[in-house]
Amino acid sequence: MMRTIKLIGIIISLSLSLSTATLALMNRLMYSRSVVFRESMSCINATVNEHSKYAIIVHGWRESCHVKWVIELARNLRQFRKGCIICMDYGDMAQNPNYLFLAKQSDDLSEMLADKLRELEDRGYDPSNGYMFGFSLGGRIVLEGGRLYGKQKIAEIDVCDNAGPGFDIFEQPDSKESAQNVQCIHTSRDKGTRNRDCHQDWNMGFCGRRQMAAGSPPKGSHGLCPIFYNAAFHFDFFAEAIPRQCRRAQAYYNFWPSNFKMGYMERRKFEITGEFYSSTTHEYPYTPDIGSADTILAFERFKRRIMRIRKRSKPFRWN
């Protein structure tokens, strides 16, 4: 009798496991129709070797690969990084007004991203030349996708205001496992995570909780994060001493090299780990020293240079 009960229990357990696995597979097959990996022209028919670079951008909720900050980031990467540029477009799913429903699908989306990373490796790309960027829910997807692909296998991941609601209430894997270097930029308290577990955690503006330039969505404190990140390709957001209002019981001081700054352009970040602070201002380019005569002059020169570059260069389009 006892053997029969145990056998029934094992059968039920196996059935539940198979049902869960089958459901997950069905979900991924269903979502695959709603997710497109859009590649730049530099990816098509490219001659791939051990030095070839790739970059993957993942947008957030209610967005797509055609929103302004994504296109601007793709342009910046084309100019400063070069190589294959890809955007994971789950825009059809992202338009769902129920954020928590979409958050529950992040594991399936992360699996799809990990599959894409494996495909790129099969095409000859070395993960040590890989880079990913994610904003909000996209941040959760790139971190989990990178971790599923392999612990610290990809070179670098930058995350902008990683989504907090629906995630912070659960224990999450250590973000540092997702890439050899993970840089996280924090700009809001209500929509962004409260966790600080990246190689570099940048608290922007008022302690990473809110921004002076915040207005109505999509340019609230949360939505400003990728705008700051794009601005940092051309302007500097330097590390500074911890503001008095940001002090916490567990606050600690860091030592950083001269002019250490937030963003992709800071290539010394692989050598430094810690929590950093940087001020922001109320208007573009949001750098705290924009009031100086030298910075204003540089800003005017920058605007003229960007206009010339955009007149000469082709508009960025996904294939």
Image: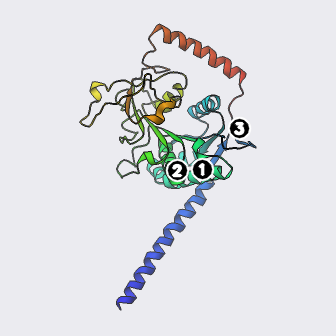
Q: Amino acid at mark 2?
A: Gly
From where the camera sits, is residue 223 visible? no
C-alpha separation, residue under disc 3 versus residue under disc 2: 23 Å
C-alpha separation, residue under disc 1 versus residue under disc 2: 8 Å
Which residue is farthest left?
249
Quadrant of the drawing holding the N terminus = bottom left
Classify 106 as above or below 191. Answer: below
In the picture of the structure, the residue carrying the numbered disc 2 is: 145
Q: Position of residue 91 (x, y in %)?
A: 58, 45
Which residue is farthest top?
293
Earlier sequence position, callout 1 versus callout 2: 1
- Occupied quadrant, residue 31: bottom right
Classify 217 as above or below 296. Answer: below
Which residue is farthest bottom?
1
Q: Position of residue 295 (x, y in %)?
A: 49, 12
Q: Amino acid at mark 3?
A: Ser
Quick check: marks 1 and 2 in contact, CB under 8 Å? yes
Residue density around tag 3, few if under 14, some if 14–19, many if 20 or more, within 10 Å:
some
In the picture of the structure, the residue carrying the numbered disc 3 is: 42
Quick check: marks 3 and 2 in contact, CB under 8 Å? no
Residue at 56% in and 63% down: 25
What colour scheme has been applied to the protein in the rendered image? rainbow
From where the camera sits, is residue 290 visible? yes
- Occupied quadrant, residue 291: top left
Q: Nearer the viewer, residue 194 or 61?
A: 194
Element under disc 1: helix
In the picture of the structure, the residue carrying the numbered disc 1 is: 117
Q: Position of residue 157 (x, y in %)?
A: 51, 41
Residue at 47% in and 7% down: 293
